[in-house]
Amino acid sequence: MSRIYAFANQKGGVGKTTTVVNLSAYLAAAGQRVLVVDTDPQSNATASLSVNHRSLSESIYDVIVSESPITDIIIQLSPHLPLFIAPSSPILSGAEVELVGLRGRETRLRSALRLVRDHYDYIFIDCPPSLGLLTVNALSAAQGVVVPVQCEYLALEGLTQLMTTINLVRRSLNPGLNVRGVLMTMYDGRANLSEQVVDQVRQHFGDKVFQVVVPRSVRLSEAPSYGQTILTYAPKSPGGLAYQALAVELLAGDDGPAVAKKK
Ligand code: ATP
Ligand code: MG
């Protein structure tokens, strides 16, 4: 059965999508079957993996709102890599409102994933920057939450609210939900502040914080515009090495194969 992780933080621009896309690529290169589920109406994960939402007849919107089978929308991104996406599209922005009146509004994604959860090693859900129904659907469907946190002033701000939401979902909808890990992103080695923030977050979350810290690396922000992940765009860049190391750390913690290697 898949390990299903939601990548969540209601703060925008902290590295959720960058992490989902690049970590998935390294895991797939290590032979893991990975499904990325884009639940953000911004569709950044979909675009970063070179899928044009305009070319799609159906997307995750149809799965969540109209209960279309998720198998109808899944696309394999390359014939050489076991990396798949359930794409999003901007019409998903209406789902937050449409879901309110629908039966099982918090658990529709969980129900949808039943069809495919035996077919992948990992299912990564990229969440929007909010704690609305789409994120609640992701938290209800997941076993673990990965929380990317940007190394900047007030990094811990908002995490209390996220943890409260996770606890609420655990109590009411998904008793098995855990925090899989907190990931420090956009670390700037030249700034004292970055180091202070990492220390502060480690004091607060202890060993829940991944050992790997993702540095600020311009290659990571460039890769999507070339239709690539960091795995092919700049694997030797600091950002590439960090996501490769994160794949190894995740697999080791999940009792998977210990070495994630580039194909
Ligand atoms: P949103 O909340 O809007 O969905 P997000 O949390 O998914 O945002 P990303 O889209 O991954 O965040 O990253 C925000 C911006 O920062 C993007 O332009 C991305 O390319 C850039 N970025 C992410 N991680 C890094 C990094 N380690 N170094 C440099 N730039 C980065
Ligand atoms: Mg995003």
Image (tube, rainbow, N blue to C red):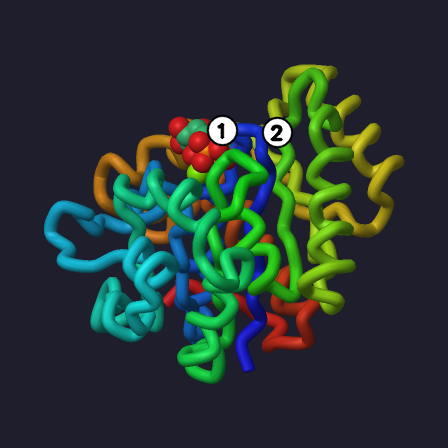
Q: Residue at x 60, y 55 (%)?
A: 139
Q: Quick check: can you spot residue 241? A: no
> Where is residue 99 drawn, in percent x and y?
43, 50
| 139 relative position to 241: left or right | right
> Where is residue 104 drawn, in percent x and y?
52, 63
Q: Amino acid at mark 2?
A: Gln
> Where is residue 225 drawn, in percent x and y?
24, 35
Q: Quadrant of residue 48?
A: top left
Q: Residue at x 51, y 28 (%)?
A: 12
> Where is residue 49 drawn, in percent x and y?
28, 50
| Position of 47 relative to 216 (above/below) | below
Q: In the rendered image, which quarter contains the N terminus?
A: bottom right
Q: Residue at x 70, y 52 (%)?
A: 181
Q: Quadrant of residue 29?
A: bottom left
- In terms of depth relative to the viewer, which is nearer, 65 or 198? 65
| Position of 73 relative to 14 (above/below) | below
**Residue wearing tag 2:** 150
Q: Residue at x 40, y 66 (%)?
A: 35
Q: Quadrant of residue 199?
A: top right
Which tag is nearer the camera, tag 2 or tag 1?
Answer: 1
